């Protein structure tokens, strides 16, 4: 079972990036999925999550209004569209799956049991 994150890179402030997370080995269509990020010297923090009931979405206060999470269960993928990027968005971004609680979306990274390898996003000022 593997989650593969991609789409990171270097972008100027105000620009956009689209991260994608592809799952293989099992389907995660019945599991909440999330994106987290970790900047150097900081703890891993919640960015966005998407549930299984009508694909309900949740965002951190810093992501709300700028980022959009979506999922395509036919392709077993979860994307994160990031607009109006800021230098403080610079971090390694991880996708994750929570297979323990189908109908509850958690913001706690410890609740998630499958993780991608991370993709680096660097926003220059």
Image (cartoon, rainbow, N blue to C red):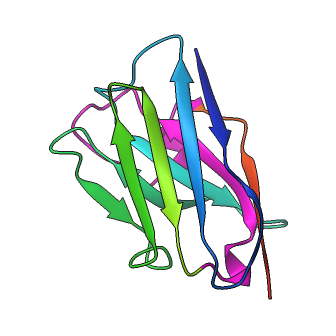
Residue name at image x 67 percent, y 74 percent? 89
Where 125 sits versus 83, above or below? Answer: below
Quarter of the rendering containing residue 39: bottom right
Residue name at image x 45 percent, y 34 percent? 77
Instruction: Tell me if I can see residue 44 in this picture.
Output: no
Instruction: Tell me if I can see residue 5 in this picture.
Output: yes
Residue 6 in the image: state x and y as whole percent: 67, 42
Residue 41 in the image: state x and y as whole percent: 84, 67
Quarter of the rendering containing residue 84: bottom right
Tell me if residue 61 is in the magenta stretch. no
- What is the residue that sits farthest to the top in this orientation? 25
Residue name at image x 73 percent, y 48 percent? 119
Tell me if residue 91 is in the magenta stretch. yes
Q: Which residues are magenta?
A: 85-114
Residue 52 in the image: state x and y as whole percent: 23, 38
The quarter of the picture where the N terminus appears is top right
Where 82 sits versus 70, above or below? Answer: below
The quarter of the picture where the C terminus appears is bottom right
Residue name at image x 48 percent, y 47 percent? 79
Image position of 69 (left or right of 30): right
- What is the residue that sits farthest to the left in this orientation? 54
In terms of depth relative to the viewer, which is nearer, 105 or 118?
118
In terms of depth relative to the viewer, which is nearer, 58 or 104?
58
Residue 122 in the image: state x and y as whole percent: 79, 68
Image position of 10 (left or right of 7): right
Counting labels gives: 0
């Amino acid at each position: 079972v593997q989650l593969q994150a991609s789409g990171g890179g270097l972008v100027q402030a105000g620009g956009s990036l689209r991260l994608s997370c592809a799952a293989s080995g099992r389907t995660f269509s019945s599991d909440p999925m999330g994106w987290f990020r970790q900047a150097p010297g900081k703890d891993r923090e919640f960015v966005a999550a998407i549930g299984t009931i009508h694909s309900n979405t949740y965002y951190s206060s810093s992501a709300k209004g700028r980022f959009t999470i979506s999922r395509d269960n036919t392709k077993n993928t979860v994307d994160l569209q990031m607009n109006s990027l800021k230098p403080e968005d610079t971090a390694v971004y991880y996708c994750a799956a929570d297979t323990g609680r189908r109908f509850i979306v958690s913001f706690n990274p410890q609740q998630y049991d499958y993780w991608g390898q991370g993709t680096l996003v660097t926003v220059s000022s």
